[in-house]
Each structure stands twice: as structure tokens, then as C-alpha cells.
Image (cartoon, coloured by chain):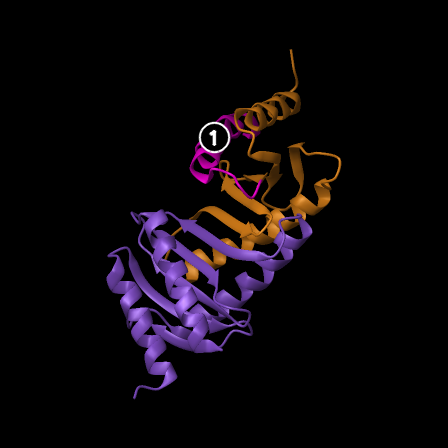
Chain colours: A purple, B orange
Amino acid sequence: MRSRTEQMVARLRDLRVSTTDIEASAVVSVDGLIIASDLPAAVEGDRVSAMSAAMLSLGERIAGELGRGNLDEVYIHGDEGYVLLMASGMDAVLTVLAREQAKLGLVLLEMRRAAQDLEQLVS
Amino acid sequence: MRSRTEQMVARLRDLRVSTTDIEASAVVSVDGLIIASDLPAAVEGDRVSAMSAAMLSLGERIAGELGRGNLDEVYIHGDEGYVLLMASGMDAVLTVLAREQAKLGLVLLEMRRAAQDLEQLVS
């Protein structure tokens, strides 16, 4: 039987295979530690987790201060691709790096499915 | 003849009228000062500008650190709506508050048009 971490990594790999638009993904705790990841060698886990925690913290503050309720998702769009963050339960966030030409609707749909599955494994 | 600020406010009003999904908008300098705004009484300009500048700064850092190039846009999705930020030239950002049920594709299209028009007025 596979460990919980192995199951999470397998789910992240399934997410990457589900669309060619996803380059890397990680499940990060709200305090900025990697729980599980599927990252190419060029992407440092520590950098992904630190950026995810910083974004989550500021995103929550902004959503609250500007009357947008509780934070669900953050999309950062650069001219070379996307960073997408989505809550996975109360204690973790799913962070995805997607290509510039990504079909965003499809990526978000696959992310929502993965976030639900991962929530079961985190808790 | 209308002042440049009046023209910018008029363009922001046109943006709001273009779709019922937009509640408020502002053009903010990269250092966090309001250049022009179309905000309902319940939304404080200082809060919008401070949050925009903080988000812009972190978004640029994240896009850079995670290999996504130069920052174009940030979307923050809460369970009660969106905060959307988009560059308007090199020195300003267009920030929009949109309703939870917003048709995001349409709002972003209208924002891009407005950002281009406003860029001419800022510079």
C-alpha cells in the first residue's frame, strides 16, 4: 500500500498528464512547507512554497479588505505563463505553474478536481 | 476641454457601464497612490491603492522567481467576488472589483481595452 505522500504525488502527476499546459505543481501548507510536489528539476521546491505562502497571506488580506469574502483562488499571469493557487481544504494550497498558452478554463477545472482529491489525503 | 483626470474618471465610468459585473475601479500608481477612481462610497480609495501596490509588488516578485516573465495581470477570487489587477503602461495599474457571478472573460476584455485607453492618459 502506498503512503499518503506517494498517493498525493501520484495525484499531482495525474494532474500534469491531464493537460499539456501544466508544467509543475505542489501542495503547500498554509505556513509555507511543501507537503507533496511534482516539480521539474529547474523549479526549486523551497521557492514555490515560500511564494505560495506569501501570496496566500496577501490574497486573504486583500479579499478581506476589499469585501470579496474568503479567498478561493489566485491567478498570476506573466508574459511567460501563469502561477495558479487554489485552496485544498483549510490547511493547504495547490500551486500550479502553467504555460503562457494555457487554456485557463481547462487548467482550473482539472485543478479543482485535484484540489478536492488532495484535500482527502491532506486531512 | 476636460482635464486629464476627468477624462480618466470618465473612461472608468464607461468601463463600469460596459458590464454589470464591475462594481468599482481605480488607476493606481506603482507606488500606491490613486491617479483616478470610480468607487462607490463604501469602498475606500486608500485601501484600494495600498492593496493594489502590495499585490503588484508581490505579483512581480512571484512571476519573476517562478519563471513566468513580467507581470501582466493578477486575479484574486474570493467567495464574494474578484479583485482584478492589470498593468496600464509602465507606471500604473488598473484595479477592478467585480461581482462573484462575473463573466470573467468579458470583464478582462473590457479591462484590457480600458487599460490601453488609460495608458494614453497617464503618460
In terms of secondary structure, what is the magenta stretch mainly? helix
Q: What element carries label 1?
A: helix
Asked if the magenta segment contains residue B108, the reply would be yes
In which quarter of the view is residue B14 placed? top right
Start-end of magenta stretch: B99-123
Residue at 62% x, 46% y: name it.
B31
- The 10 Å Cα crowd at callout 1, few under 14, some 14 to 19, many 20 or more, is some
Residue furthest bottom as drawn: A1
Asked if the magenta segment contains residue B105, the reply would be yes
Residue at 71% x, 34% y: name it.
B40
x%, y% of residue B9? 64, 25
- Quadrant housing the N terminus of chain A: bottom left
x%, y% of residue B26? 62, 36
> Label 1: which residue?
B110
**Can see residue A45?**
yes
Q: Please, what is the three-letter code of the amino acid marked with disc 1?
A: Glu
x%, y% of residue B102? 51, 39
